[in-house]
Image (tube, rainbow, N blue to C red):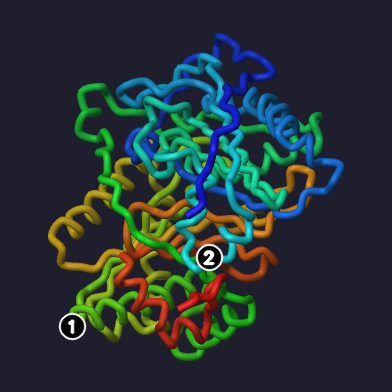
Amino acid sequence: MASSTIISRKMIKLLSPTPSSLRCHKLSFMDHINFPLHSPYAFFYPKIPQNYSNKISQILENSLSKVLSFYYPLAGKINNNYTCVDCNDTGAEYLNVRIDCPMSQILNHPYNDVVDVVFPQDLPWSSSGLTRTPLVVQLSHFDCGGVAVSACTSHTIFDGYCLSKFINDWASTARNMDFKPSPQFNASTFFPLPSETNLSSTLPATRPSQRHVSRLYSFSSSNLTRLKDIVTEESHVKNPTRVEVASALVHKCGVTMSMESSGMFKPTLMSHAMNLRPPIPLNTMGNATCIILTTAMTEDEVKLPNFVAKLQKDKQQVRDKLKDMKEDRMPLYTLELGKNAMNIIEKDTHDVYLCSGMTNTGLHKIDFGWGEPVRVTLATHPNKNTFIFMDEQSGDGLNVLITMTKDDMLKFQSNKELLEFASPVVESTK
């Protein structure tokens, strides 16, 4: 396992101070009911042009300083009851770190877990929301000359969509310091917090951190088309999306793995995250997602056409429910769905799969000025049976980061149907 050494640690201050009128950023109800975790993304750049090799850190620091003036809550402090951010211009934590191995040792390892070295220790997915700054950046230098840029952002302030907007705006600023982002931190106007007396019951609980393993799989554009054809030819499903067919397949393979372990079928619950922009404006920063719950009570419902049909039906039901719903009711509806899921989880009557997507966000081509990354990934998720979808580097296919227990992964990764449509980004040496 590669080790890391911190070269320097500093606070990146805002280029322009936050106006006193914006000093208190009210968190929305959606922000308040989210787990207070740091979401960790990393971007790997193996070849740095000669004219950039000695300027990378300075470029990142200068551009981060400017972009933070627009994303000022990331440089503040979340208060103790998760109701507001004191935008006091504390700044964002920034680390320069030396990794004692070539980047290839990380990128060519079959398990994604080794990428954790490019994140600040013990921060990814942790509930350090009140002790660390809402944004922590690490620039990792490898022996080969390549670098990785990682960002951990507080889920209390940002959902995945906002994180992608921030990273894209930061990269645009790095390439052109005259670039002006236009985020709007007004989610609380759409999702206002309820009265103070109700807050204690909605405060997010800290989840225990569990250690699992993760692997990255890739679905080519042609294989996604094949999956879509299978689904549409055998059902009444119309226009299935890439994520719908790919998540149905990994879900089916997860069920097969579970049956191999237990010798029997167990009903499943899959949770998908759905962006609420629109109807919420696209530049609204904060948490604006709703979960979609899809169950499979029989083996027949696990089959790809049947599961995609059920997933589409569940999505449409949520959309129909939200269509005429007042925006201030949406968080309560989301909270109700979350509680329903938690009740099922606590009863242990279903195998639970958590699915989220960061597709169509441009994260696969984040360019700070020295080219696009060869890989974009996350730190190992604390929850088992987690599927996180991202755009594959070409933009046409999909990558999915799959997290499971080690024993389950050993069974899952040998599934013939999985390997017919998806390939591990790094082949196992075993």
Tell me, for residue 220, which label it has, or none. none
Q: Which residue is mark 2?
A: 109
Q: Residue at x 43, y 43 (%)?
A: 124
**In the displayed structure image, the side of residue 82 where residue 133 appears, left or right:** right
Q: CA distance from mark 1 to mark 2?
A: 33 Å
Q: Position of residue 361 (x, y in %)?
A: 62, 53
Quarter of the image with the C terminus in it: bottom left
Seen in the picture, residue 377 relative to 180 is either above or below; the reply is below
Label 1 or label 2, whichever comes before in sequence order: 2
Q: Position of residue 58 (x, y in %)?
A: 74, 30
Whether residue 277 is visible here, answered yes or no, is no
- Mark 2 surroundings within 10 Å by alpha-carbon count, few (fewer than 14), some (14 through 19), many (20 or more): some
Seen in the picture, residue 44 relative to 179 is either above or below; the reply is below
Q: Which residue is mark 1?
A: 264
CB under 8 Å between callouts 1 and 2? no
**In the displayed structure image, the side of residue 102 where residue 294 appears, left or right:** left
Q: Position of residue 130 (x, y in %)?
A: 37, 26
Whether residue 200 is visible here, answered yes or no, is yes
View extreme (right): residue? 51
**Residue type at tag 1:** Met
| Front residue of 404 and 109 | 109
Q: Position of residue 50 (x, y in %)?
A: 85, 45
Q: Secondary structure at mark 1?
A: loop
Q: Residue at x 37, y 77 (%)?
A: 412
View extreme (left): residue? 347
Viewer-nearest of discs 1 and 2: 2
